[in-house]
């Protein structure tokens, strides 16, 4: 099957955060929006068809999770990640970010420590601080243009009475896919210090060729306290529908998370979200394969262009996700100057690295989940602005 990722999809005036939120975020609508982590591609036909079929029924009442959606998850992760999930392990959730907040409350008391690894997706921080938990940072370490976990420092963090580690895998924004040896080392530390690990694997299907993503939960042994967040939202461009799931083999951890959701009466979910979720995992394989070929070609073009035409900026080439982590420190600008340069001189709207915490200063995050022509144009604008 052929899929056209160069097709123009007009997203303005659809209440899109990425497009219609430009004025509020950047102070102007005159920027190419390469920020919010959704894509500009039409979703797979199987998803559209499932939504249309559900909309054809004129009643949208309270909805159960059908047996088929559990089976769709089980089949997808067995087929794609060689992970045998049991139905009882699955807990549905209203999104990955609410799950971060729920985990902070479930596994650490007020004042107790939660470890995050910056630079990282900013709700990791707010999930901890908003709930009056102690934020313990284990910064990632850049080594020859590749980020690594500082395990020695992680041991120090764990010794500070931490109860929970929030792991981003694949990592947003630096694009690392943690290898099996790294994950085993994390598990050893978690056992030594009785840590619960929440493993955010929402980008687990967006892996480039030559790289293998291993689900941390697949490596876990009985007794390990691992919570894995999964969703088709990033993979199939349906994040606005919200639904996600948690895979929690340990019954005590599972009940603790359920209790958090039940305390807010977060149970039944949108029938359209359920239809789209199941359809993506049942019929989206070919579309996803084509998407990754397209994104990889865009990533490789960007890497070559930046190295050749704008060497003042260094690309941390991602192993996964459709997000580029741009090292702009050689430009010699403050973070405010850097943001203004890209908005006013280049007319590009990106996420400043500072929002991702320690280690983000001097960086920008660029979303390449759009038509390649948009990325070509954006990089040309940067080249011209730097030349001026």
Image (cartoon, rainbow, N blue to C red):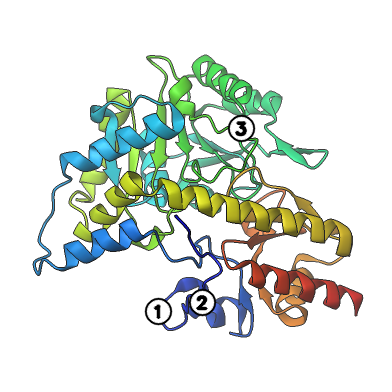
* Mark nearer the N terminus (1 vs 3): 1
Dot 2 crowding, Cα within 10 Å, few <14, some 14–19, many 20+ = many
Q: Position of residue 265 (x, y in %)?
A: 19, 50
Asked if the residue at tag 1 contacts the one at tag 2, i.e. Cβ–Cβ closer than 8 Å, the answer is: yes
Q: Nearer the viewer, residue 288 or 127?
A: 288
* Mark nearer the N terminus (2 vs 1): 1
Give the Cα distance between marks 1 and 3: 36 Å
Q: Position of residue 382 (x, y in %)?
A: 79, 72
Give the Cα distance between marks 2 and 1: 9 Å
Q: Secondary structure at mark 1?
A: loop
- Residue 32 left/right relative to 145: left
Above or below residue 93? Residue 193 is above
Give the number of the disc on residue 14: 1
Residue 346 occupies which quadrant of the picture? bottom right
Q: Which residue is mark 3?
A: 178
**Residue beneath the point at 40% across and 62% down:** 43
Give the number of the disc on residue 136: none
Give the number of the disc on residue 19: 2
Above or below residue 5? Residue 279 is above
Q: Nearer the viewer, residue 50 or 147?
A: 50
Q: Position of residue 183 (x, y in %)?
A: 57, 25
Q: Secondary structure at mark 2?
A: helix
Q: Nearer the viewer, residue 26 or 208?
A: 208
**Residue beneath the point at 34% across and 48% down:** 283
């Amino acid at each position: 099957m052929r899929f056209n990722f160069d097709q123009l999809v007009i997203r303005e005036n659809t209440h899109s955060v990425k497009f219609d939120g430009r004025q509020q975020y950047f102070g102007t609508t005159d920027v190419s929006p390469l920020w919010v982590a959704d894509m500009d591609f039409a979703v797979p036909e199987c998803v559209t068809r499932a939504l249309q079929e559900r909309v054809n029924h004129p009643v949208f009442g309270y909805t159960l999770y059908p047996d088929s959606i559990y089976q769709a998850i089980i089949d997808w992760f067995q087929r794609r990640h060689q992970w045998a999930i049991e139905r009882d392990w699955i807990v549905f959730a209203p999104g990955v970010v609410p799950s971060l907040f729920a985990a902070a409350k479930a596994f650490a008391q007020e004042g107790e420590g939660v470890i995050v690894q910056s630079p990282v997706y900013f709700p990791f921080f707010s999930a901890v601080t908003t709930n009056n938990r102690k934020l313990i940072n284990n910064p990632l370490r850049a080594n020859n243009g590749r980020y690594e976990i500082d395990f020695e420092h992680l041991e120090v963090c764990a010794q500070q009475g931490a109860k929970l580690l929030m792991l981003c895998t694949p990592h947003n924004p630096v694009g690392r896919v943690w290898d099996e040896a790294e994950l085993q080392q994390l598990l050893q530390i978690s056992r030594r210090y009785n840590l619960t690990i929440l493993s955010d694997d929402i980008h687990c299907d967006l892996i480039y060729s030559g790289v293998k993503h291993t689900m941390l939960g697949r490596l876990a042994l009985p007794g390990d306290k691992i919570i894995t967040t999964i969703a088709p939202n990033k993979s199939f461009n349906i994040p606005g529908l919200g639904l996600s799931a948690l895979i929690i083999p340990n019954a005590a951890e599972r009940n603790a998370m359920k209790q958090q959701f039940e305390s807010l009466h977060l149970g039944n979910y949108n029938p359209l979200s359920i239809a789209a979720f199941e359809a993506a995992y049942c019929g989206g394989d070919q579309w996803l394969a084509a998407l990754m070929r397209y994104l990889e070609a865009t990533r490789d073009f960007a890497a070559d262009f930046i190295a050749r035409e704008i060497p003042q900026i260094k690309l941390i080439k991602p192993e996964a996700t459709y997000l580029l982590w741009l090292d702009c420190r050689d430009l010699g600008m403050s973070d405010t100057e850097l943001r203004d340069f890209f908005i006013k001189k280049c007319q590009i709207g990106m996420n400043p690295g500072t929002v991702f915490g320690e280690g983000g200063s001097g960086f920008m995050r660029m979303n390449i989940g759009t038509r390649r022509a948009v990325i070509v144009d954006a990089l040309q604008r940067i080249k011209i602005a730097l030349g001026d």
